[in-house]
Structure formats: C-alpha cells, structure tokens
Amino acid sequence: MATMTIRNIDDRLKARLRVLSAMHGRSMEDEARDILSTALSAEPTRGRHLVDSIRARIEPLGGVELELPAREVIRAPVDLGA
C-alpha cells in the first residue's frame, strides 16, 4: 500500500474531519481513507452537451419552422485606394 501526506489543509476542514471521524469511531486517517475511497469509487457523471440538454427540454413541445430570408447578392468590395 502507498503512503500519502497531505499538507496545508484548512483548519476548519481538519476540524470537520476530526468530528466526523469521532462520530464514526475511527481515526482521522481511516475517515479520510473512507472518504477518498467513496468519492473515487463512483463512476464520474458525464454531462450532456448544452445543445443536447436544450433539445431534450424543447423537443416534447414540438418544432418551429422559421422562414429564412432569401440571400442577397454579394456586394462589390469598397475601393479604399481612392
């Protein structure tokens, strides 16, 4: 098994860990090990892309047909040398 040292932990965080470990009747090291194990054993949730999320909300309401304006002819470039 590997050993890990964690430095610069916020005092409030350490106090919360101390209280939590006392509530569970184990050492702070065991509590931290359990927290890490629990947090890292779950599969990370993969978020959907924004477009997919919007589509999932809007699709049940039905679609909308938009009338697109006809494209115009491209104008001649401006002569900046004159």
Image (tube, rainbow, N blue to C red):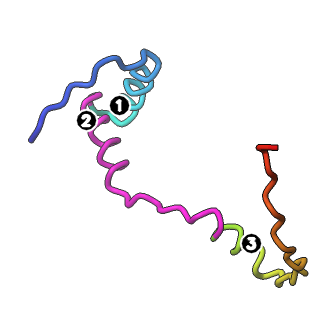
- Asked if residue 76 is among those painted magenta in the image, a careful observer would answer no
**Residue 40 to residue 59: above or below:** above
**Residue 42 to residue 70: above or below:** above
Which quadrant would residue 42 be assigned to in this image? Answer: bottom left
Mark identifier at residue 70: none
Q: Which residue is mark 1?
A: 21
Element at label 3: helix
Cα separation between marks 2 and 3: 44 Å
| Residue 9 shown left or right of residue 79 in the figure | left
- Circle 2 Cα neighbour tier, 10 Å, few/some/many (<14 / 14–19 / ≥20): few
- Circle 3 Cα neighbour tier, 10 Å, few/some/many (<14 / 14–19 / ≥20): few
Query: Dots 2 and 1: beta carbons under 8 Å?
Result: yes
| Residue 73 shown left or right of residue 27 in the figure | right
Q: Which label sits in the foreground, 2 or 3?
A: 3
| Residue 71 shown left or right of residue 19 in the figure | right
Nearer to the camera, 31 or 24: 31
Mark 3: amino acid? Arg
Cα separation between marks 3 and 1: 43 Å
**Residue 52 to residue 13: above or below:** below
- Residue 68 % position (x, y): 87, 78
Element at label 1: helix
The magenta span reads 27-51
Q: Which residue is mark 2?
A: 30
Nearer to the camera, 59 or 67: 67
Q: Which residue is mark 3?
A: 57
Q: Which label sits in the foreground, 3 or 1?
A: 3
Mark 1: amino acid? Ser
* Residue at the front extreme, as displayed: 82
Nearer to the camera, 77 or 10: 77
